Image (cartoon, coloured by chain):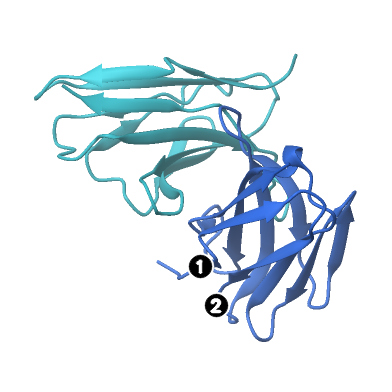
Amino acid sequence: ILNVEQSPQSLHVQEGDSTNFTCSFPSSNFYALHWYRWETAKSPEALFVMTLNGDEKKKGRISATLNTKEGYSYLYIKGSQPEDSATYLCAFFATDSWGKFQFGAGTQVVVTP
Amino acid sequence: DGGITQSPKYLFRKEGQNVTLSCEQNLNHDAMYWYRQDPGQGLRLIYYSQIVNDFQKGDIAEGYSVSREKKESFPLTVTSAQKNPTAFYLCASSYQASPPKLFFGSGTQLSVL
């Protein structure tokens, strides 16, 4: 089982502030890195699918970067809003384990007005 | 509406009892997955199926069984051999893309009486 770690485990952010958090994964056998957003009482939803070193993806105020050589991805939230409150999961997909995403434990983000 | 339906939302199991969690999808996805979530841990893969009548063990298959008789359905049975079944169970599906993007159900919370 591959080790995917997310830090911090939780974040409290004031509305309007920006924040970022990390997903680290094995740098060998990289195929893809996914970010999912999981709001309370809802289903996790895919935010980004990242496959190339140096990838940068953006969706509204949320963006992500990828460094496959050193094995990390950052997710950024600019000007946080209460609706950004959720748990953000990253999932690593290796070349030698089709179908087997390895998920991190998630970063829980709470945005307070 | 297209999506993944998991039922029931809450399930209680008595000692020595087998219980079955339902997962149905109408997204016409080929692949389906079962994950387990425990507090403070990432989602862990129990079983996955890439096509009808075929499935593979994930990282924590012991004490669980599945079937895939129809494309739309992938039920999970938690057997009495699973000694620590209390957890949150998520079902997911995906196209056979590379890499596959997961679409999740809303989950079933299983507790032991």
Q: Amino acid at mark 1?
A: Val
Same subunit, tags 1 and 2: yes
Percent of width and height locating residue A87: 59, 47
Tell which chain the image draws in blue: A
Q: Is residue B7 above or below residue B29?
A: above
Tell which chain the image draws in cyan: B
Q: Kindly identify which chain the residue marked by label 1 belongs to.
A: A
How many residues crowd mark 2 within 10 Å: few (<14), some (14–19), many (20+)?
A: some
Q: Quadrant of the C terminus of chain A?
A: top right
Q: Amino acid at mark 2?
A: Pro
Q: Kindly identify which chain the residue marked by label 2 belongs to.
A: A
Name the residue tied to disc 2: A26
* First-in-chain label (1 vs 2): 1
Percent of width and height locating residue B53: 47, 30
Residue A85 or B19: which is nearer the viewer?
A85
Q: Residue at x 70, y 24 (%)?
A: B27
User: Which label was assigned to residue A109?
Assistant: none
Percent of width and height locating residue B4: 61, 23
